[in-house]
Image (cartoon, grey):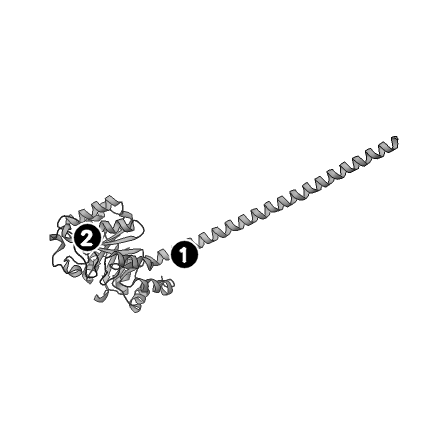
């Protein structure tokens, strides 16, 4: 009887031990699988993070390259033609990849800044009158030949914010126009997204006092104007007229020797753009933004 009990007890112990062994084995297997799964998950996450980092770096490099390419191309009036200085022209240039959009700025009789290439409204609208003698109420009612409104500079600022760089030419050289421009720059806080240009050195000299870090571009119509300002302390960029024979290697080197950027206007065909790139021109105005950016990507990268 005792032997039977011992035998039964032994069997029970063996059964318990087997159960414990199986449980331990199951735990070990489960634990091993969990550890392996955790390692695989960690490895996958590390790989995904590495891939995301690689893609981010590639995107950043691509963005930097596109920014460098775009910095050479200034979209002249957005694009010249019936839609010049309209949202349609600006939007088309931006869609093509431009980040530098030109605005020519004039002022109405009551001090409102408008975007127009010429001081007389007749060129864009057919209304024969100098902006400085036309009220803003009248200008706001005008339409261009393409049916676009004459834009206020404030409207342009409101639409594009700090997403672009404004290449603003103050066509009106009067002090009160310069002051109105300063007031608007301060109102919007846009001094860091504007390249200001003028054919009047004194305008740039005045702006240098308040905005020493704002790039200043002098529009040079002649060789004498270029040479007379090549060492000017308040000029950062010298832009010369393309069809005046001023885009020369000598002028480019002279500008660079004096720490200035060398620019030109207006380049609209492949031959003239490639020649400018070969000469080392830093930037240029163009009416054909898609063409210019295409050439910069395909030809300019290896030359810059």
- Left or right of 141? Residue 280 is right
Residues at marks 1 and 2 touching, judged by CB atoms closer than 8 Å: no
Q: Number of labelled discs?
A: 2
Q: Nearer the viewer, residue 284 or 27?
A: 27
| Figure quadrant of the C terminus | bottom left
Name the residue furthest top: 2
- Left or right of 76? Residue 108 is left
Q: Which quarter of the figure has residue 17?
A: top right
Q: Secondary structure at mark 1?
A: helix
Tell me residue 66's x, y (percent).
37, 57
Residue 61 appears anywhere in the view = yes
The circle drawn on residue 62 is: 1
Tell me what residue is drawn at x 33 percent, y 58 percent: 95
- Left or right of 212? Residue 1 is right
Tell me residue 297's x, y (percent).
37, 62
Name the residue furthest front: 1
Tell me what residue is drawn at x 79 percent, y 37 percent: 14
Tell me residue 149's x, y (percent).
20, 55
The circle drawn on residue 198 is: none
Tell me residue 32's x, y (percent).
65, 44
Q: Residues within 10 Å of mark 2 (few under 14, many from 20)?
A: many
Q: CA distance from mark 1 to mark 2?
A: 36 Å
Tell me what residue is drawn at x 64 percent, y 45 percent: 33
| Figure quadrant of the N terminus | top right
Residue annotated with mark 2: 114
Q: Which quarter of the figure has residue 210?
A: top left
In front: label 1 or label 2: 2
Q: Earlier in the sequence, mark 1 or mark 2?
A: 1
Q: Nearer the viewer, residue 7 or 278?
A: 7
């Amino acid at each position: 009887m005792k032997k039977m009990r011992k035998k039964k007890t032994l069997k029970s112990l063996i059964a318990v031990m087997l159960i414990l062994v199986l449980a331990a084995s199951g735990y070990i297997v489960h634990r091993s699988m969990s550890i392996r799964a955790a390692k695989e998950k960690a490895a996958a996450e590390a790989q995904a993070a590495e891939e995301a980092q690689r893609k981010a770096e590639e995107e950043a490099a691509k963005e930097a390259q596109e920014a460098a390419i775009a910095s050479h191309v200034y979209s002249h009036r957005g694009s010249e033609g019936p839609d010049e200085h309209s949202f349609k022209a600006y939007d088309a240039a931006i869609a093509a990849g431009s980040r530098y959009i030109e605005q020519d700025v004039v002022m109405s009789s009551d001090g409102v800044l408008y975007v127009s290439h010429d001081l007389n409204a007749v060129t864009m609208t057919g209304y024969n009158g100098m902006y400085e003698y036309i009220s803003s109420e009248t200008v706001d009612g005008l339409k261009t030949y393409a049916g676009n409104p004459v834009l206020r500079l404030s409207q342009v600022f409101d639409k594009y914010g700090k997403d672009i760089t404004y290449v603003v030419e103050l066509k009106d050289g009067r002090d009160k126009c310069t002051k109105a421009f300063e007031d608007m720059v301060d109102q919007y806080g846009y001094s860091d997204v504007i390249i200001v240009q003028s054919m009047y050195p004194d305008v740039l000299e005045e702006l240098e006092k308040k905005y020493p870090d704002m790039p200043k571009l002098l529009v040079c119509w002649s060789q004498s104007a270029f040479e007379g300002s090549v060492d000017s302390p308040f000029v950062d960029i010298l832009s010369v007229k393309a069809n005046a024979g001023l885009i020369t290697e000598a002028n480019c080197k002279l500008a660079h020797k004096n720490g200035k950027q060398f620019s030109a206007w207006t380049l609209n065909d492949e031959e003239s753009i490639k020649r400018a790139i070969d000469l080392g021109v830093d930037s240029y105005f163009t009416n054909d933004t898609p063409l210019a950016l295409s050439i910069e990507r395909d030809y300019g990268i290896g030359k810059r």
